[in-house]
Structures are given as C-alpha cells and as structure tokens.
C-alpha cells in the first residue's frame, strides 16, 4: 500500500450501495486532499463503480486507494432488506486486512455495528459516519428524551419537538418504528457512538449552526462537520461517475436542458434505492402534467404491487398518451435508471427539486441553490423535510404523512392535486418562491465557503488530520 511516511492512514468502510456509500467515498477523497492517506474498503462490484473517480485523484497526486474485499454481498435497496442486510460475511476478510495493515483510524458507517466491535477489539480508533446532518439527531434525541411517544394515542395529531431552537412539528406517523417504540428499540446508535473516537458529519456549520452547537454540546463528544463533501466533485467526469454509471446520455440531457428557459424545469428524484409503485407514479405523472411545468423525472425501478408480483405483465404507471404528449410539447424527460444528479441540479434551467429528502439529495439541492418540494418517505427524511421547510424555509411540503419501513407495502398514495399544488407553488413566479430562491442561494454560497481554505468544514478536516497525526507521533494507545 502506497503510504507516505509520516502521513496519517485513514480507512473508510462505507455501507454497500445507496446514499451512504456515495458521501463516504467523497469524504475519503476530501481527507486525502488534506494530506491523509485514504483507503476505501469496498466489495468488488462497488469498488469497480468508484475506480475511475479514485484513479483520477491518484493521477493528480492525491493519496487515495481502494481495497477490494474478496467477498461480495448484494447492494441494499429499500425493498430488499435495507440496512438490515447481513454484511457479516465481510467480517473475516476485514479482520485479516486490518491485522495486516493497521490504520491510524477507521471511519465506519453506522449501519456496520459488527465492524465496530471488530475494530474495538483490535483497538483501532474508530470514527462513526452517520450519513445525515446534526438536525435529525437533535430532533430524535429530544423526542426520546422528553416525550412519552408510546402513550401518545393519535398517529396524526401534530406535536412540537421540545427544547429545540425552532418550532418543529411532527406526527407519530412520521416517526420510524424505532422512535415510535423506544422501550423495544433502545437508542442502538448511542452505544456505537459512545465507544467511538468521534463522529464525522457530512454537513456544514452555517447550514444548521444551532443544531451543530447542540450536537457538540449535548450529544456527541467529538464531532467533525466536514461537508458538503459532494463539492469535491469539480469536473464533469466526477459529477457523472458518482455511484453508478448514468443510464442516460448526459450530453443529450444537457442539450435538452440548454433548450429550456432559466429556472423553468423541476428535477424529480427519490434517491438511489426507493422504488415507487405504479399507482404512485401515475399520480406524479398527472400532477406534473397538470402543473404545466417542464421536468426531468428519475423513475428508477418500479415496485410491483403484491398482486402483480407473480405476474410478468407490467402494470400501467403512466397515463394514456402521456409520453407522446410530453414529447410533442417537449416538456418532460423521463430517466429510467440512474441520472447524473449533481450535473442536472447545477444546470441553470433547473428551478426546483422534488426530493424524498435523503440527506445527500437535500445537501446537493442546497448546494445547487435550488428550492425543493419535499416528499419524505423513510429513514430520517421527515426530519430533513422540517429542516428544509420550517427552519431554512427553502421548500414546500407535498404533504406526505406516513413513514415507510424497509420492505413494507406502500402505505400512502399522495394524490395528483397535492403534487400539482406543491410544484406550482415552488415553480411559479410568486414572491414566496422568489424569497425561497434568495435564501437557498445564500446558503449555497456559505456551503461553498465552508469547504474552501479557512472555511469551517475545511478547518474541521484539518483538525482531525492534525489530531490523528499528534496521536501517531506520541504513540498514543487507548481503547474507546
Ligand atoms: N443519485 C444519483 N443519481 C440518481 C439517484 C441518486 O446521482 O439517479 C445520488 C444522489 O446524487 C445522492 C445519492 O444518490 O448523492 C442519494 O442519496 P440520498 O441521501 O439523497 O438518498 P438515498 O439514496 O440514501 O435514499
């Protein structure tokens, strides 16, 4: 392994696939660009997906490599097993690698608790990567701490999350099964975090200052806020070769966007692994058509309903003649697989982002200076929605009410009227929309400054590298 003498060796062990892997790869690249020797540990197929990115960095002299484990597991999707997928087959291969190449520290995704045990046993300083911002940790932390959620009778009666700097309203139906049943599911993250060297957050201080302070003071002992890490992707190649290969011709997509008026197109995407059922896609199509706005809509894979699971017939998911009408009017582009999201969001024709509020998409929307229609579905997305709409005031809620568990049947179809109303509210030239646009542009600017030399995130990355270096020089040995 090409380790510079004296350089700090950091390993990054991301979760397989999905929205946890992409930001951790970027984080590894950020640390490497600050002089740490970064090694990404990945399964063979995932290693292949990121090889080009990493090779380009290496060619620019950045000390980064990928170590491919000789074991494969399927990528997570929301309908297979989600984060419950068994990743323990990687345990022995990881152990062998760590024993032969002990790093100065390892960054582990929070969905790999078994890897945490292994790393603790080997007495390697361990840093947790949560994949989300500070805000949700404060929201869910305070709900657990101050509300007896299990005795709350109504699923749909809004309550205010206690002791937060902003008025944040949620309903029980928008909480995960874990938050709804804290006596059955104690805060499993707490133990993982408590024994760690600290936590890396992909966010930036200026986005959520009160929550960053609160997190540092009340929740985690050591926090490095190092994002938005997606901003390390500067070239067109970096922006398109992130995660998976784009299934559309990126030039064709950009050409189509070039033909559009500035801020006239809404980008619609539900992230890396959510699959929507045909009946929900149908409502989105009707809503988008009725809004009269142009769109790029990433449909991804379609979720078959229980009754259609055994049948080969494709269930209808677009209204009669929809594609022809959109083609004739040149109003819409449907992407059937993976889109170059960063590139699309940055295009001047994009005026809005209908998002499931995955943390990466939320940050990427913010960094592109694009206001959002929020449509949370699962994980901590309902809390991200509140950050966007109630705290930052840069988005409009579509009106989604039901938290969806991994592998669960689709609970709630959001109707076409709600889609139409929210899209119009965001995309029409109203004072409210203009104000949101001004606010999000300002935040985008502060995000850019945060990762520049001297910026808050830049300093946090440097601080961690420095701390690890000092530990190394002093021969520090300690268990966490
Ligand atoms: N993404 C992409 N193209 C797609 C779908 C997703 O580039 O067609 C990327 C997106 O830019 C983001 C990540 O995949 O970086 C999705 O992460 P997020 O946290 O938003 O959602 P998740 O996939 O975890 O639900």
Image: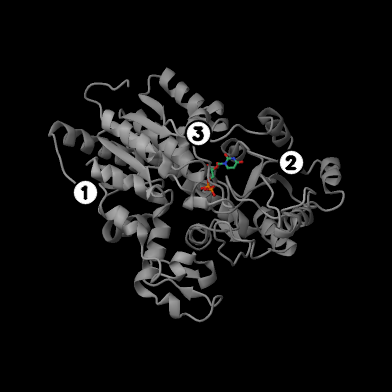
Q: Is residue 101 visible?
A: no
- Where does label 1 land, which residue? 480
Q: Position of residue 175 (x, y in %)?
A: 49, 66
- Label 2 to label 3, Cα distance in Å? 28 Å
Q: Which sits earlier in the primary sequence, circle 3 or circle 1?
A: 3
Q: Could you tell me how far apart the alpha carbons at marks 3 and 1 are, in whole angstroms?
A: 30 Å
Classify residue 57 as left or right of residue 388: left
Residue annotated with mark 3? 46
Q: Do the residues under discs 2 and 3 have CB atoms within 8 angstroms?
A: no
Residue at horizontal 55%, vertical 26%?
Answer: 237
Q: Residues within 10 Å of mark 2 (few under 14, many from 20)?
A: some
Q: Residue at x 53, y 42 (%)?
A: 75
Q: Secondary structure at mark 1?
A: loop
Residue hosting label 2: 333
User: Residue 263 lies in what quarter of the image?
Assistant: top right
The residue lying toward the viewer, choosing from 186 and 461, is 186
Please give the label number shown on residue 440. Answer: none
| Count of labels in the image | 3
Q: Are marks 3 and 1 in contact (CB under 8 Å)?
A: no
Residue 135: % across, % down: 41, 58
- Using residue 285 as the reference point, say whether residue 20 is left or right of it: left
Cα separation, mark 1 vs mark 2, equals 51 Å
* Closer to the camera in the image, 141 or 189: 189
């Amino acid at each position: 392994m090409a380790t510079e003498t004296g350089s700090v060796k950091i390993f990054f062990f991301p979760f397989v696939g999905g929205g946890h892997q992409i930001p951790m790869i970027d984080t590894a690249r950020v640390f490497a660009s600050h002089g740490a020797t970064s090694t990404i540990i990945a399964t063979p197929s995932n290693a292949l997906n990121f090889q080009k990115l990493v090779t380009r960095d290496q060619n620019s002299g950045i000390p980064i490599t990928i170590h491919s484990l000789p074991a494969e597991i399927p990528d997570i999707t929301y309908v297979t097993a989600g984060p419950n997928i068994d990743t323990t087959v990687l345990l022995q291969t990881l152990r062998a690698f760590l024993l032969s190449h002990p790093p100065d520290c390892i960054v582990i995704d929070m969905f790999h608790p078994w890897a945490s045990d292994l790393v603790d046993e080997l007495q390697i300083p361990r840093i947790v990567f949560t994949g989300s911002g500070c805000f949700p940790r404060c929201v869910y932390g305070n709900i657990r701490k101050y509300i007896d959620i299990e005795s709350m009778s109504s699923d749909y009666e809004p309550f205010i999350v206690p002791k937060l700097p902003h008025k944040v309203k949620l309903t029980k139906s928008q909480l995960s099964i874990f938050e709804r049943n804290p006596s059955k599911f104690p805060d499993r993250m707490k133990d993982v975090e408590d024994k760690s060297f600290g936590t890396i957050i992909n966010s930036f201080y200026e986005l959520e200052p009160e929550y960053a302070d609160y997190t540092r003071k009340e929740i985690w002992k050591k926090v490095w806020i190092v994002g938005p890490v997606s901003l390390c992707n500067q070239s067109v190649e970096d922006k398109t070769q992130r995660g998976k290969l784009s299934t559309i011709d990126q030039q064709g997509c950009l050409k189509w966007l070039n033909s559009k008026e500035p801020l006239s197109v809404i980008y619609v995407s539900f992230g890396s692994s959510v699959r929507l059922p045909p009946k929900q896609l149908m409502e989105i199509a009707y809503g988008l058509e009725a809004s009269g706005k142009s769109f790029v809509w990433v449909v991804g894979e379609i979720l078959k309903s229980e009754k259609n699971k055994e049948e080969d017939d494709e269930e209808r998911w677009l209204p009669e003649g929809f594609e022809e009408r959109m083609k004739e009017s040149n109003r819409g582009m449907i992407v059937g697989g993976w889109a170059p999201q960063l590139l699309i969001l940055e295009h001047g024709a994009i005026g809005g982002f209908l998002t499931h509020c995955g943390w990466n998409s939320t940050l990427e929307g913010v960094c592109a200076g694009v206001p959002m229609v929020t449509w949370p579905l699962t994980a901590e997305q309902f809390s991200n929605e509140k950050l966007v709409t109630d705290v930052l005031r840069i988005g409009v809620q579509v009106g989604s009410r039901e938290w969806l568990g991994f592998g669960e049947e689709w609970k709630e179809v959001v109707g076409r009227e709600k889609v139409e109303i929210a899209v119009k509210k965001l995309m029409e030239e109203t004072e409210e929309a203009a104000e949101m646009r001004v606010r999000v542009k300002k935040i985008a600017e502060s995000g850019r400054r945060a990762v520049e030399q001297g910026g808050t995130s830049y300093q946090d990355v440097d601080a961690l590298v420095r701390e690890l270096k000092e530990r190394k020089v002093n021969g520090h040995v300690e268990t966490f």
